[in-house]
Amino acid sequence: VDLARDAGYDAERVAELREAVALEAYYQSYQDKRELIADLLFSDGGNLAAHVSEQFREKLETEVETADANVVTEAVDGVEFALLDTDGYTHRYDFPPTPLLLDDLHRRRADGEPFATVGVGTDELYVRTTADVSVRDVAERARELAPNADIATAGVREGKIEFLSGERDAVEDAVVAAVAESF
């Protein structure tokens, strides 16, 4: 932020650029958008980034509203959980990607108390917490609680755990229990 400010960018402009690049980077995974990224960063007088940033916000807000309306909450061992069926209430192949959606949903719902957001798909699960919880430790403990699910840590940075699709319910219960124990 300091470097951006020193280069003449205010906080709003930095946010617009971050959002615009995030949206275009997502679509770049499907089509080459290098020229657009270069325009956003180096040739744009502000209008293009502002326009793309607005698209980012609109798409994210629409998805968050849908997801938020379909979150199931439960409390386990003093930890409040927000559980979302990501297969049923997200657009898997459209923006925003599930990890970004869960990040935003988690930030909106977390209020300083012990809180976790868990997004459960067919054979993958994402965890967000207000505590410093190790996804590897959660997966290890969940493997003990659901030994037939072939649970594996798939992405520590994104809080992703994979499992056998036929064991989805057992994995959800095991991960919730393991996360609650980790607080």
Image (tube, helix red, strand yellow):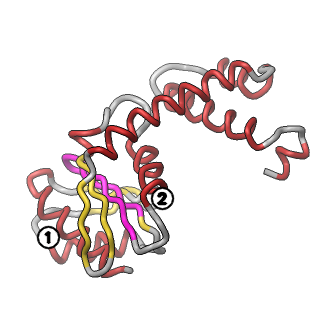
Give the mark nearest the N terminus, 1 or 2.
1
Locate the C terminus by quadrant. bottom left
Magenta highlight: main SS = strand
The residue that disc 1 covers is 146
Magenta residues, start to end: 115-128
Give left or right: position of 182 versus 56: left
* Secondary-structure class at tag 2: loop
Residue 27 x %, y %: 49, 26
* Secondary-structure class at tag 1: loop
Q: Residues within 10 Å of mark 2 (few under 14, many from 20)?
A: few
Residue 72 x %, y %: 23, 55
The residue that disc 2 covers is 157
Q: Amino acid at mark 1?
A: Ala
Q: Amino acid at mark 2?
A: Arg
**Distance CA(mark 1)–CA(mark 2):** 23 Å
At 43% from the left and 31% from the top, the residue drawn is: 95
At 83% from the left and 38% from the top, the residue drawn is: 9
The correct choice, above or below, for 96 with respect to 32 in the image is below
Q: Residues within 10 Å of mark 1 (few under 14, many from 20)?
A: many
Residue 162 x %, y %: 26, 56
The correct choice, above or below, for 37 with respect to 79 in the image is above
At 59% from the left and 20% from the top, the residue drawn is: 33
The correct choice, above or below, for 117 with respect to 20 in the image is below
